Amino acid sequence: MTSPILAQATGVDTGDTAWMLIATALVLMMTPALGLFYAGLVRAKNTLNTFMMCVGAIAVATVTWAAVGYSLAFDEGNGFVGGLGHAFLQDVTFEPRPDTTIPHLLFFAFQATFCIITTALVSGAVVERMRFGAFLVFAGLWSVLVYAVLAHWAFGGGWLQAGGTLDFAGGIPVEMGSGFSAFAAALVVRQRKDYGRQALLPHNSVYALLGAGLLWFGWFGFNGGSGFSTGEPSVLAFVNTLLTPACTLLVWFVLDLMRSRQVTAIGAATAIIVGCVGITPAGGFIGPGWAMLLGALAALPSYAFIVWRPRTGLDETLDVLAAHGLAGLTGILFIGFFAQESWNGVADGLVYGNPAQLGDQALAVLAAPAYAFVATYLILRFVGLIMPLRGTGYDEASGMDVTEHGEEAYTSGEGAILVVPEAGVEEEVAVGRP
Amino acid sequence: MKLVIGVVRPEKANDVLEALYRADVRGLSLSRVQGHGGELDRVETYRGTTVKMGLAEKVRFEIAVSEPFVQPTIDALCEGGRTGEVGDGKVFVVPLEQVVRIRSGEVDRGAVTPVQGS
């Protein structure tokens, strides 16, 4: 419809648009990658159900985002929530969104992938017991009532952004939003029945490592795309996305060595996530040197929490609070200390003579987790009133793959009797003859 | 001496191990098996193919015990393995001709009694 010449005339930059098309696809890939990561961390009998929670998030959150979520996050409104001017993609066209050089439609799609993965992240708290249908209902409500609101605060002109809080790629809505929502979800859905009674071990560490690797790959689009251009902030965030997780990995290795004299693979997969999360809010705001320090520092609270959490009654199954909530919180606060105007062109932090920035960051660290926790708690209580949140003890014991989906991840086919034959059965091939 | 064979639900295997431990029964083998005991078939669907899973996953315990331990072993298998639903499994008790401990050459009662046991 729009010719390249017209596109240029309306302020769309072809280079920026090309990069943002790719970045959007990279971020969408992170959700199946998260499914793989999560599937590796659960028991074999829950592999498919765990993966399907992430696939389900793609289905539900995309639709809610197009319907009202995007508008509530990014349309002009009050400080708390946006308006309904863009509901059902009204006025979301090829015209660039103000302050960007990419089509508004593409901006919408890029932000949609963020809503999807954040919704999928929360499932980590409730896998191996929550019913699939109940999760889909929860995902629909959560993507609008929690994610869109927090995204408005941080990105859409809401009160935190207006007050000067810096969040480059989603430390507030994505990382703290998912982490502290996971905390609430684990409390409402409660422990798995075998929690604390049996060893509940990851069934495939290779899935976890491969998933983490794909997430890291996708994160270059997540952070590198959050400048909405190919400009300097995007390049800085892109490079920091390499530096920070590498430092987190090294520190995690050292912590593992101190704790058990062995470097663990599941630990490494976790460290990659923690490092990527840490740099998410800070990517375009701090220099590469500080980004490496952030990687090292971000490992500490998350590691400590992951060691401590299983000794408590809190079955926050895949440690979303530790890996996303706490690491995101660390990154948000880190900006308050080490933001550097010579790198970001926006603001300095405490170390460079602007203590007020730390105050702005601290405000986000108090407000966003509180909202995410309370809102998620109420949403799940509400969903719990209309339908059971959990499978029965039998469902849990047999595994959610068979009881929720009627499939198994690792079926041998032995003992399976064909009920509905596939069409076009050919004459039986004789076996064992030359 | 008897060989006690218990076929139980995989998800109850841990409970059975715990019950056996509490009954002081030591020394057992465990294997994953597939079988059919008349329970309801489970239907699964993969794309256009619908199948009835005629064989169910079970865990098979094999425990060789001296006479005083026969009943406690059977009790432990039943107590740990029971859910009350169809498909809880079976216990088979068969006489045992001879047992030899390979390391020491001990036979029978000496061989079925674990080293740290009574």
Image (cartoon, coloured by chain):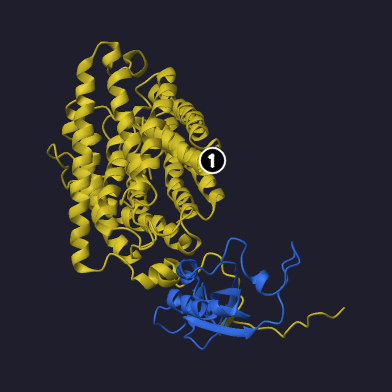
Chain colours: A yellow, B blue
Q: Callout 1: 10 Å neighbours few (<14), some, many (20+)?
A: some
Q: Which residue is mark 1?
A: A264
The correct choice, above or below, for B95 with respect to A345 in the image is below
Residue A293: in sight, yes or no? yes
Q: Tell me: residue A295, above or below residue A410.
A: above
| Number of numbered markers | 1
In the rendered image, the quadrant that contains the N terminus of chain A is: top left
The amino acid type of the residue labelled 1 equals Thr
Residue drawn at point x = 23 percent, y = 21 percent: A358
Q: Position of residue A63 (x, y in %)?
A: 31, 56
Residue A137 appears in which quarter of the rendering?
bottom left
- Where residue A232 sits in the image (x, y, percent)? 40, 22
Residue A407 visible:
no
Answer with left or right where residue A291 lies relative to residue A173. right
- Horizontal side of B85 relative to A140 (left or right) equals right
Is residue B53 or residue B99 the one in the foreground? B99
Residue visible at 31% across and 61% down in the picture: A136
